[in-house]
Image (cartoon, helix red, strand yellow):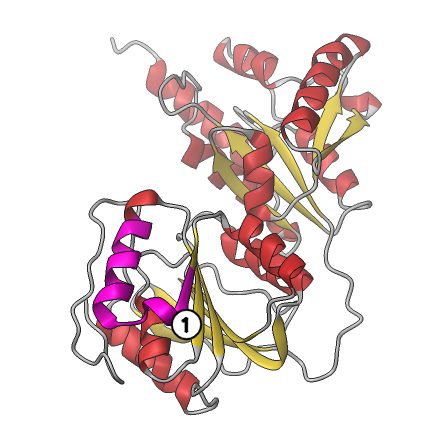
Amino acid sequence: MRVIAGSAKGRRLKTTAGRATRPTADRVKEAMFSIVCSRFELAETAVLDLFAGSGALGIEALSRGARRAVFVEAGHAAARALRANLEACGFGDRSRLLPLSAPAALRRLAREGARFEGALLDPPYSKGLVAATLAQLASAAIVRPGGWVLVEHHCDEPPPAEPWPYLTPTHRYGKTGVSILRVPEEPSDHIMPRIAVYPGSFDPITNGHLDIVRRTLQVFDKVVVAVAYNPHKDVALFSAAERVDMIREALTDLAERVIADSFHGLLVDYCDRVGATVVIRGLRAVSDFETEFQMALMNRHLNGRVETFFMTASEAYFYTASRLVKEVAALGGDVRALVPPVVFRRLQARNQEQQPKR
């Protein structure tokens, strides 16, 4: 990986090994900056590089004349490589590294009153971070009116039409998409979407869960249905990926407002990553409340910005639980009235797979 143009042209950049990083290919980077430089002047501008990795995008901007760049990278190995690359290119005095998560860095920069003419976003693929990060960036109001935001993303996860309009159609390079958004000249009175996270094992998702999702959308703008799993101890009937697929198919009609995703680790950390401040929990009976109340208090202790919103199950679904659905289905019972069609099909197929061969 190298610097394509400018004062550091040809300089080789260090990268970090492993699956956690995905350096931008040189041909994609060259195309990205050709698009930006054909529409904006980089000279003497301030640029923000979120999810910076080893710093390839921000360093390219500095090499092409940007006055300064702020790099946001929480990974220790990537941050070490980034520092080494900045020093090797002679950009140490024109840069700043924030070793924070993107949400935390945006909050700090907003408090400091930082302003940028452009921002570069290259979040990890398949984590649902594009929409959430753009919402957080808009809320921070640190990109000047008339500025630009360049997003590198998976082709299956294009940026939403809000909060900012597309300046150009998405450019595709294999599985990589490159989109440029324009921050309006006039301040927008647009209210940022209210995002809630509905976490659970969803093994599998039931009609009771779907009822909670649909009712949640009467209160919130978007819902992230988040499959919680433990990669070291997951004894679920369906894998996390299978559960996410079933949720997406079951809620196809709400695809613009519902995101299906999976996570492990602390729920409050996941909420920060996707820009949510509310956790949705469903209550089927009074007996659920004590445990849920304790969990809500612990989450508030861990992150005071995250609140818990309790929703009682509709009367028709008081007795519907994933565990019971699996047990009844395994014994040959008809559960098609309790789950969406995709789940019924998957349950039948999985139970047939687990039948002893004669």
Residue 130 among those drawn in magenta: no
Quarter of the figure with the N terminus: bottom left
Report whether residue 195 is seen: yes
Tell me the magenta residue range. Answer: 78-96
* Type of amino acid at the residue the image marks with label 1: Val
Q: Secondary structure at mark 1?
A: strand
Q: Residue at x 62, y 53 (%)?
A: 107
Mark count: 1
Callout 1 environment at 10 Å: few (<14), some (14 to 19), or many (20+)?
Answer: many
Q: Is residue 345 above or below residue 136?
A: above
Q: Is residue 241 above or below residue 157?
A: above
Measured as percent of width and height from the top left, residue 156 is found at 44, 59
Measured as percent of width and height from the top left, residue 139 is found at 68, 61
> Most prominent secondary structure in the magenta stretch?
helix
Residue 80 among those drawn in magenta: yes
Residue 284 horizontal side relative to residue 131, left or right: right
Q: Is residue 321 above or below residue 202?
A: above
Question: Which quadrant holds residue 272?
Answer: top right
Measured as percent of width and height from the top left, residue 198 is found at 65, 35
Q: Residue at x 63, y 27 (%)?
A: 302
Residue 8 horizontal side relative to residue 351, left or right: left
Name the foreground residue: 286 vs 103.
103
The residue beneath circle 1 is: 178
Residue 185 horizontal side relative to residue 204, left or right: right
Quarter of the figure with the C terminus: top left
Question: Which quadrant holds residue 145?
Answer: bottom right
Name the foreground residue: 244 vs 99.
99
Report whether residue 337 is seen: no
Name the foreground residue: 260 vs 38.
38
Measured as percent of width and height from the top left, residue 35 is found at 40, 85
Residue 96 horizontal side relative to residue 208, left or right: left
